[in-house]
Image: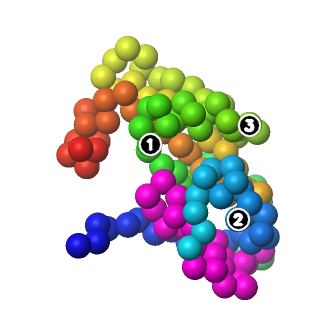
Amino acid sequence: MMRPIFHLSFPVADVEAALDFYTGVLGGVVGRRHPDAADIQLFGAQITLQDAPADVLKPNPRTRHFGATIPWAAWEAVAARLDGFVEPPTVSYAGERREQGKLMVADPSGNLIEIKAYRDPAFVLGDIAV
């Protein structure tokens, strides 16, 4: 039985540049590919990059972002290899059960991606983290 997979589709100004970013920088894997779109498996979700330069918001408001919550060690590894942060890696609530790390980057089209981790994911997210 297939587990549910979150899917997000959004416009990019240049599909090839977006593919390079999502695969080469964030570690995604290319799935289906069309001249005007590409599907990427990223952090357990499916994202579809739509070749729609006119629909890209510049600048993209901070409130319009997507992201992933990943294990702490994976978050530290991502934070160590990325640069050009919109928001640099920070740790909040250090030493508390709700301790979290987060960072934000932008893809070549300015789409914002927040990557976060929790020291105790079940405390913050409940059963969905188990």
Identity of the residue drawn at 56% across and 45% down: 114
In this rendering, the answer to whether 11 lies above or below 59 is: below
What residue is disc 2 on? 19
Q: Secondary structure at mark 1?
A: loop
In this rendering, the answer to whether 51 lies above or below 62 is: below
Q: Which mark is residue 83?
A: 3
Position of the N terminus by quadrant: bottom left
Identity of the residue drawn at 57% across and 26% down: 90
Position of the C terminus by quadrant: top left
The part of the image, by quadrant, that contains residue 50 is: bottom right
Q: Position of residue 10 (x, y in %)?
A: 61, 70
Q: CA distance from mark 2 to mark 1?
A: 21 Å
Closer to us: 44 or 57: 44
In this rendering, the answer to whether 118 lies above or below 57 is: above
What residue is disc 1 on? 70
Q: Is residue 107 left or right of residue 42?
A: right
Q: CA distance from mark 2 to mark 3?
A: 18 Å
Q: Main secondary structure of the magenta part?
A: strand
Identity of the residue furthest to the left in this view: 127
Q: Position of residue 97 (x, y in %)?
A: 30, 22
Q: Of callouts 2 and 3, which one flags the residue occurring earlier in the amino acid sequence? A: 2
Contact between labelled residues 1 and 2, with CB atoms less than 8 Å apart: no
Count of numbered tags: 3
Closer to us: 98 or 39: 39
Q: In this picture, which residue range is highlighted in magenta?
A: 32-53
